[in-house]
Image (tube, grey):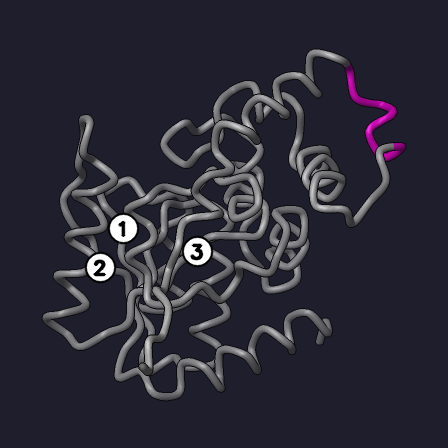
Amino acid sequence: MNTKVEVLEQWIRCNAKAANGLLIPVSGGSDGALTFALHSRVYPEKTVAVYAGTELRARGWFESIGPVRFIEQFDGEFAELDRFTQFQKLCKRENRWLVGTRNRTEDVFGTFSLPSRMATYLPIVGLWKSDVMELCKLVGVPEEVIESSRRADPDCGRPAELAEIGLENIDLFLKVQIGLLGSEALETFSAPQIEYLERAYKTNRFRSSLPVRGPTLDC
């Protein structure tokens, strides 16, 4: 088995041990598919997926992995908030943890939604999107689900401009921003691509700096 898969499964085994149940939102994309597959392998008796709508991509594969709940589809300005509110209601009703599917690319770039911060924990937040794509293939996620992540999906923080630049290049850009790679990694990027990524990075970055916990005052 791939070392990264082993590490993730061991992390899930340790950190979700106390959960009575686990609810994983899926959209038919690679992040939710990988998260669902990993949790179903480690804790099949605890894990349930949830999808807002009826047209789940590769539905047969998802349902072969584990149970999938279907809730109403939400539209409009507050659709994301409505979805996560319903997810939390399910978790409350069934005593489950809400499992987040944010990856490291979204976390560093700040392209995750604020309602998604409702999640109890984030098992794949240490994986770049390119890692997610690699691991999806290793655990048997259908190609149509993997490839859907390369197409524009504004609802999932992936507008046309980002889809055109490519997942691997976005990861390279972000690794340069946080000092993991030198600027020479961007030599093949066009000036408009770098300008767009820098502008989006500055616009969204605030989400990654939002405080989570206040200070401890023992005085």
Question: Residue 141: percent from the left, percent from the top?
Answer: 54, 55
Please rate how many residues cluster around mark 3, counting C-alpha atoms within 10 Å: few if below 14, some from 14 to 19, many from 20. Answer: many
Within 10 angstroms of label 1, few (less than 14), some, or many (20 or more) residues?
many
Looking at the rendered structure, the kind of residue marked 3 is Thr
Determine whether, in the image, residue 73 is placed left or right of residue 135. left
> Looking at the picture, which amino acid does disc 2 mark?
Arg
- Residue 125's disc is none
Pinpoint residue 48: horizontal percent, then vertical percent.
30, 68
Which quarter of the image is occupied by the N terminus? bottom right
* Foreground label between 2 and 3: 3
Secondary structure beneath label 2:
strand
Residue numbers of the magenta segment: 184-190
Give left or right: position of 211 versus 22.
Answer: right
Depth check, front residue: 219 or 118:
219
Q: CA distance from mark 1 to mark 3?
A: 13 Å
Earlier residue among tags 1 and 3? 1
Mark 2 and mark 3 lie on one chain; the one further toward the N terminus is 2
Q: Is residue 86 magenta?
A: no
Quarter-of-image position of residue 169: top right
Question: Which disc number belongs to residue 69?
Answer: 2
Residue under the point 85% across and 23% down = 188
Separation (CA) of disc 2 from disc 1: 6 Å
Residue position marked by numbered label 1 in the rendering: 51
Q: Please state which of residues 163 and 119 is positioned toward the viewer in this rendering.
A: 119
What's the mark number on residue 101? 3
Q: Residue at x 21, y 46 (%)?
A: 83
Give whichever of 40, 100 is nearer the camera. 100
Q: Are marks 2 and 1 in contact (CB under 8 Å)?
A: yes
Query: Number of callouts in the render?
Result: 3
User: Most extreme residue toward the front, as rendered?
Assistant: 219
